[in-house]
Amino acid sequence: MSDTEMKESKTKLLLQTMLRSAGKLSLFVLVSIVLLLGIKYITDPLVSEAEKTTLMETFDQVLPKNLYDNEPLNDTKTITDPAMLKMLGSEMPVTVYRARKNGKPSGLILTAIAPNGYSGEVHLLIGVMADGRISGVRVLKHKETPGLGDKIELNKNPWILEFDGRNLRDDNDPRWAVKKDGGDFDQFTGATITPRAVVAAVKNALRLINQQGEKLYE
């Protein structure tokens, strides 16, 4: 065999080896994608159901069942207006759950985000009665510092209950702040940023509800 033929044979063998390796790698990637999609297909409904269960359990904490006789999960309105979403700290549509008693409006439940927590976003669920008073606020998700900012959780500290029964009017607007800023709400020792962010988020949500009024029940 000549040198030229030997070189061509080696080149051909190298190409075959590279093609086999590329084929194996492609097959591996394809199988991995299929497995990931399969796992997602199986787990997504479970995650969705778990989130729905958690949401319903939290519903009862922010708006007592005795205040309504309908099914808020099936009586909703979606907020898509950018200006309104900005007030709720969200870039995605927000669902408003409407509570009614004997066919009349009795309360609203909606989510809001405090974007400026110490460690990032703080996701809230807020219940507001038809007269504009807060029936409850609970934290759905956050990344605040354990032992400091996580006192916004009811199971860590009763601070979140300070919102119960409050409303937002022109005369009390300045009081919607932590005490360090001249308001009515307590702050946590060594962690003022977190309660300040939550108070501002709840205040903005109330302002939105005050502005929209009955439109949110339509």
Image (cartoon, rainbow, N blue to C red):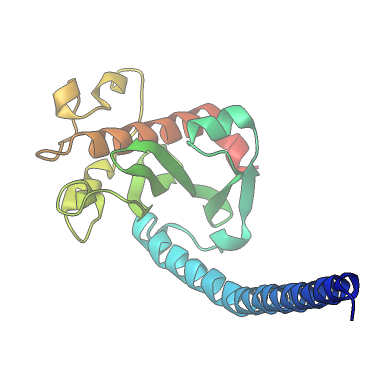
Residue 144 horizontal side relative to residue 127, left or right: left
Which residue occupies the extreme left position in the image? Answer: 189
Question: As rendered, which of 49 and 162 lies closer to the eye?
Answer: 49
* Residue 16, x across and y down, in percent: 81, 77
Q: Residue at x 46, y 63 (%)?
A: 55
Q: Residue at x 62, y 56 (%)?
A: 75
Relative to 25, 49 lies left or right:
left
> Which part of the image, by quadrant, shows the C terminus?
top right
Quadrant where the image shows the N terminus:
bottom right
At 61% from the left edge and 80% from the top edge, which residue is drawn? 42
Q: Is residue 94 above or below residue 187?
A: below
38 vs 101: above or below: below
Give whichever of 166, 207 is nearer the camera: 207
Give the residue displayed 14% in from the left and 25% down from the top: 180
Residue 147 location in percent, x, y?
Answer: 14, 53
Q: Position of residue 133 (x, y in %)?
A: 36, 39
Number of on-image labels: 0
Q: Quadrant of residue 72?
A: bottom right
Q: Is residue 51 above or below residue 176?
A: below
